[in-house]
Each structure stands twice: as structure tokens, then as C-alpha cells.
């Protein structure tokens, strides 16, 4: 029977091999364990197996786990779910990163509710890459203005972009990855704080790394046993 520790070993090996095969010089890929619906015990197991960053989709569920695991001060908590404006305060006060800024109002409220005693919140703009109507993220044509607003907020540290390409049944839509990669390069040139492309989940790690992702959000490949 596989377990979380074994899963993480396999995942890290897979990433290492992909980087070699892509002829990319061995760069640093951050793994964020997508831990929605997983218990604090399972998160603890992943932590003890060498994962230090966790992504939660639901504010209250995430905060409960943050509290339960507060004895581990080396965990970095990411909010990766759809964010409603009335929950922004809780996210600003409890998480280290927010990956899902998709409109100015959210950026404004996160900035406002990040207290002065905390370091600036690391944030990513989520881009709706597959142009799906019901998908989260800002329209690909409108990210520039939002990026400018976010970059000027004193309590936010604008680190880059996040995207979740649509899972196609038969083939990977490479143009989506190409577009997101281009947007990342444009922003990286423009803003010196930008260094993070959060792209890739259990189903598309290979493609994401091909397009220079340096942060992958992995749920099933870590927690499915
Ligand atoms: C659940 C989730 C993931 C992880 O997906 P898996 O297929 O389980 O690896 C990544 N990103 C977001 C935003 C998620 O909600």
C-alpha cells in the first residue's frame, strides 16, 4: 500500500526526471500540497515527509487547520480557492499567500486587512486561461491593469500569476500554456517582485514544467493512497 510519504518520494523523483529530460538546468520548483478536504493528520504526514507549503480552498476549513497545526512554525499557507470579498479579512490575517486575486476589489480588501505587524502578503493574480465562463480568474485581456493596481499596494507583495488550464479529455491544449508563459514573462520584465508562475496540478505536471512553471499545486498525487 502506498502512503503519503511514498507518494511524495515518487512526485519529487518525477519532477527531477522531468527537469533533466527538458534540459532545463535544475531549477527550484515549489510544491504546494493542495490539501482541501484532507485532515490535519494527513497534512502533518506530508509535512514530516518534506512538504512545507499547503494550499487550502475554503477559508474556514483552512483556518481550522492552520490553528490545529500552529506548533509547526515552518508551514507556509496558501489560499487557492475562490475568494469572496466578505472573507478577504480572514484570508489576509491567516494565510501567507493568496493565489486567487481576480479583481481590484479583492486586492484592495486584502491590502486593507493585512495588519501592519504582518509582513506583506504574497499574492498572485489568477488568470482565466481557458476562457471558461464559470471558471475563476481575470480575463486574459484585462490582467495588465489589475497587475498595476496590485503592484502598488503596500501590504501586498506581487509575486506573479496562477492559472488552471482546462483539463481536456483527449489532448492538452498547449496554446493555453504558451499564453500563460508569455504573460508571466511580460510581468516578470515589468515588475521586479514577480518570480512565481503557479501552474500545474496532478494531471499536467509535465506540461506545466515545460512552460516554466515554478510552483505546482498537487492534491491527488500526494494524498491519494
Ligand atoms: C484541488 C486543486 C488542485 C490540485 O488538484 P489535483 O488534481 O488534486 O492535483 C490545484 N489547484 C487548485 C486551485 C485546486 O483546487
Image (tube, grey):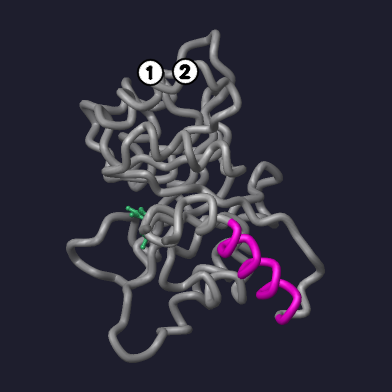
Asked if residue 196 lies left or right of residue 137, the reply is right
Q: Dividing the image into 4 quarters, which one contains the N terminus?
A: bottom left
| Inter-mark Cα distance, 1 to 2 | 5 Å
Q: Position of residue 75 (x, y in %)?
A: 54, 30
Mark 2 CB within 8 Å of ligand 1: no
Q: Position of residue 24 (x, y in %)?
A: 76, 73
In-front residue for pair 141/97: 97
Q: Secondary structure at mark 2?
A: loop
Residue appearing at x 44%, y 77% in the figure? 176
Magenta-drawn segment? 9-21
Q: Give the crowd class for mark 1: few <14, some 14-19, many >=20 residues within 10 Å.
A: few
Determine whether label 1 and label 2 are within 8 Å by CB. Answer: yes
Residue 14 counted in the magenta span: yes
| Residue at mark 2 | 70
Residue appearing at x 49%, y 45% in the figure? 124
Asked if residue 221 lies left or right of residue 166, the reply is right
Q: Quick check: 200 above or below 179?
A: above
Return the mark for residue 151: none
Return the mark for residue 67: 1
Amino acid at each position: 500500500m502506498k502512503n503519503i510519504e511514498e507518494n511524495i518520494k515518487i512526485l519529487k523523483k518525477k519532477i527531477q526526471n522531468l527537469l533533466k529530460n527538458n534540459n532545463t538546468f535544475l531549477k527550484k520548483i515549489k510544491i504546494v500540497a493542495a490539501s482541501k478536504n484532507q485532515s490535519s493528520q494527513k497534512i502533518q504526514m506530508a509535512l514530516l515527509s518534506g512538504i512545507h507549503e499547503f494550499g487550502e480552498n475554503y477559508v474556514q476549513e483552512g483556518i481550522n487547520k492552520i490553528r490545529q497545526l500552529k506548533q509547526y512554525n515552518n508551514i507556509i499557507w496558501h489560499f487557492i480557492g475562490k475568494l469572496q470579498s466578505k472573507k478577504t479579512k480572514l484570508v489576509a490575517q491567516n494565510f501567507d499567500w493568496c493565489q486567487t486575486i481576480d479583481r481590484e476589489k479583492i486586492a484592495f480588501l486584502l491590502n486593507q486587512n493585512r495588519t501592519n505587524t504582518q509582513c506583506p502578503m504574497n499574492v498572485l493574480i489568477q488568470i482565466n486561461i481557458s476562457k471558461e465562463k464559470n471558471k475563476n480568474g481575470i480575463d486574459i485581456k484585462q490582467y495588465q491593469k489589475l497587475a498595476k493596481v496590485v503592484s502598488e499596494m503596500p501590504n501586498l507583495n506581487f509575486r506573479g500569476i496562477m492559472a488552471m488550464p482546462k483539463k481536456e479529455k483527449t489532448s492538452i491544449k498547449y496554446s493555453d500554456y504558451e499564453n500563460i508563459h508569455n504573460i508571466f514573462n511580460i510581468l516578470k520584465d515589468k515588475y521586479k517582485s514577480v518570480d512565481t508562475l503557479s501552474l500545474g496540478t496532478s494531471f499536467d505536471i509535465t506540461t506545466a514544467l515545460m512552460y516554466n512553471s515554478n510552483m505546482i499545486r498537487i492534491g491527488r498525487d500526494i494524498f491519494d493512497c
